[in-house]
Amino acid sequence: MPHEPINVANLIDLDVDPSLEWNPAYVPPILPKRSSFFSSGSGYLVTHPSTGGIVMMSPSAVDLAYLELPRTHDTTRSTPDVEDDLAVRMLGLGATWWPNWVTYSRHKARIDDDVIYDFHFPPKTYVGYPSTGGVWVMQFSPDQNWFDSLGQYGKQRTWPEMPLDFHVRMGMVLSMDEKCEAIRDFGGVFWEKVAECGLVAKDLDEGREKWRGFEGHLR
C-alpha cells in the first residue's frame, strides 16, 4: 500500500520543532490520525490523554493486536474516554508519557546524531503478557551507539545495548506468548504479579510521574 503524500506546507500546524530538518522520524501522526504506519511510514502510535501530554510508542503487529487496533490502516483519534483507555494500555506495553512532541523529537534527533543520553532519556521498554499470567519486561539503552564526538566507547550503560538481532526476532513473533519468549531469551525479567512490576506504568498519573525522573535533563 503506497504512503499517502504529505503536504509539507501543512507541517507548520504540527507540534514539530522547526529547528529540525524535514524527516518523517521527527513528525507526529497528522491529526486527526493517531498513528503513522501508512500515512508517513514513521511507525508511531500517539494518544493525547485528557490529563495532558502525549503517550507514544512504536508498536509491533503483536502490540497492535493486543491494543485491539487494526494492522492494515492508520486510525484516528476518538473520544477522551477512549483515548485515555488506549493511553493506559499503551503504557502497559512500555509506551512513554511526554509533555509534547517537540520535546521528544528534539532529543530523539540528538540521539540519532550519536549524542549519548544514557539515563537522561527514557529506555526502550518491551513488555509481554504471557497467557499463563505475569509480565515479562526488557529495557535497553536509548542510545544508538556508545560513542560520541569525543570517541567514547565501551562506557558502562545504565541499560544494556540492544542486540542487533533483537528487532529481527521481534519482527518475526506472531503472538504475545512468542513475544514473551523472545524477551525471556534476551535476558528480560519476569514478574508473577503485574502489580509488583515497577518498570511499567499502571495509569496515566504513574506514566507522567515516571517521566519526571527525566524532566530536568530534557528541556
Image (spheres, rainbow, N blue to C red):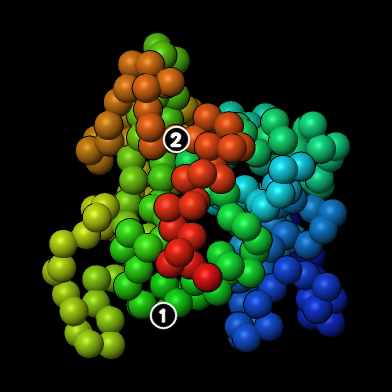
Q: Nearer the viewer, residue 31 or 168?
A: 31
Residue under the point 51% across and 44% down = 209
Numbered tag placed on residue 95 in the rendering? none
Measuring from the top left, give residue 200's x and y in whole percent: 44, 35
Measuring from the top left, give residue 111's x and y in whole percent: 41, 72
Vertical position of residue 173 compared to residue 52: above or below:
above
Q: Earlier in the sequence, mark 2 or mark 1?
A: 1
Point out the frontmost of discs 2 and 1: 2
Q: Amino acid at mark 1?
A: Asp
Q: Quadrant of the N terminus?
A: bottom right
In the rendered structure, the answer to whether residue 160 lies left or right of residue 80 reads: left
Numbered tag placed on residue 113 in the rendering? 1
Measuring from the top left, give residue 63's x and y in whole percent: 55, 36
In the rendered structure, the answer to whether residue 15 lies left or right of residue 217 reads: right
Residues at marks 2 and 1, CA–CA distance in whole angstroms? 28 Å
Residue under the point 72% across and 59% down = 29
Q: Which residue is mark 2?
A: 200
For the question of whether residue 95 can be seen, the reply is no
- Quadrant for residue 71, please give it: top right
In the rendered structure, the answer to whether residue 94 lies left or right of residue 148 reads: right
Q: Secondary structure beneath disc 1?
A: loop
Q: Secondary structure beneath disc 2?
A: loop
Residue under the point 21% across and 59% down = 157
Measuring from the top left, give residue 52's x and y in whole percent: 71, 49
Residue under the point 41% across and 41% down = 126
Residue at the far top in the pictured view: 132
Q: Crowding at label 2, few (<14), some or many (≥20) Cα neighbours within 10 Å?
A: many
Q: Crowding at label 1, few (<14), some or many (≥20) Cα neighbours within 10 Å?
A: some
